[in-house]
Image (spheres, rainbow, N blue to C red):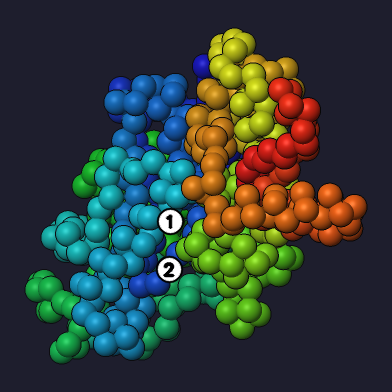
Amino acid sequence: MDLKFYNTLTRSKETFEPIDPANVRMYVCGPTVYDYAHIGNARPAIVFDVLFRLLRHVYGENHVTYARNITDVDDKIIDRAARDGVSIDELTKTTASQYHADVAALGCLPPTHEPRATKHIGDMVAMIGQLIERGHAYAADGHVLFDTASMPDYGKLAKRSLDEMVAGARVEVASYKKNPTDFVLWKPSDEGQPGWGSPWGRGRPGWHIECSAMSAALLGETFDIHGGGIDLAFPHHENEVAQSRCAHGTAVMANVWMHNGFLQVEGQKMSKSLGNFVTINELLRTKTFGGREWPGEVLRLAMLMTHYRQPIDFSIKRLEEAEAKIARWRNLFAEAGEGGDAADAQAVTEALADDLNTWDAIGELDRFASSRNGSALKAGVELLGLEGALAAQSAADIDVDVDAFIAARLAARAEKNWAEADRIRDELLEQGIQLKDGKDPATGEPVTTWEVVR
């Protein structure tokens, strides 16, 4: 089966041809571990987990290598540790564990490799040395900087003019720079800051060099796919390309560059000042968004209901739509079981093969549910990483005394207080519990059963 992906580098959809089909290699930029990951961080984790699953499905589980890094040395980490009065090591270990728990709840598989920046300092120092030797970097005022003028096609990935790159560089234009767009590869560390010895003095790496060094160490100088959010295309990914190509003398760093679109919350850019900054942890484990906790499979499906390259508006309405869809799949699967033809799930693979068209793939799952093809539905949700969508739920999954509610409702019905009975039914439904009225076949007495629909 041919896979086709949109390549940011060429601005076109291309047939994917791995360098080595026996070892398809993918790198995705991971978190900087100083705080809980926000819902925007969840999108690339989910999108590229789907890609990882698709590649494993097509090429075999043992023939795909997925590296997703952890940045555990960064100025934000240093500042947060100082603010909270904890060691950097304690902060990064705690936050990395939080991230792992959150993305696991979203159905994401662990990557093949999860390199930490602090474990690859030697690789970074060696790469910086290569750049200096090749005339692409220079030492100045205790820093080492990449010389952007030394690379004629710098800016090729982002396709930005020099003026745009200067405006978007997000780095200070220091007096020791040759060019405004030159960026830091190595910077000095003050006493009390993390630092490592190097030919240019005690210091620490710049952010961009970390990913270049780690990807080369684990995947090689040139690999198949590099992924991340569109916000990283410039300057981070542009600078990764510059460092890697110039250090290794290669034509490309990765053959395919894939970027997921921006995320906003309830129609607005997510920010703490607007009060709509939402973390994955809050969505999963608190009632700060919509007044309730949301299951991981609902959050995942809500993300996948928009094509990965398009902007997404993350909202309570979207979550409710995803939850209703899952409830329908779950109920139909409970009734139909694993009957039907699992081979029909090939339609889900074909949808994903067309630039990860998750919306069409979800449409196929709806079709399987309608036709009661439980086998195909199960295979399809597994390919999308939505295994939890079909899992039967029980009273252990909720913190509501359902029996007490049912008893109160039966009492209200006996008194013909229909308004109170309806109120109790609706209150339970808001909490994801649907009541079903019927009669005991043996006695003919009224009986009420219930099921979890979230």
Write the residue at 29% across / 40% down: 112
Q: Do the residues labelled 2 and 1 touch (CB within 8 Å)?
A: yes
Residue in the foreground of this view, choosing between 374 and 116: 374
Q: Could you tell me how far apart the alpha carbons at marks 2 and 1 are, in whole angstroms?
A: 9 Å
Occupied quadrant, residue 162:
bottom right
Q: Return the residue at label 2.
A: 36
Q: Can residue 34 be seen in this view?
A: yes
Kind of residue indicated by mark 1: Asp
Write the residue at 24% across / 44% down: 218
Residue 3 spot, x, y in % from top left: 53, 25
The local secondary structure at tag 1 comes to helix
State whether residue 15 is above or below residue 68. Answer: above
Q: Return the residue at label 1.
A: 102
Residue 149 spot, x, y in % from top left: 39, 66
Kind of residue indicated by mark 2: Tyr
Residue in the foreground of this view, choosing between 190 and 173: 190
Q: Residue 389 carries which label?
A: none
81 lies left or right of 5: left
Write the residue at 60% across / 76% down: 271
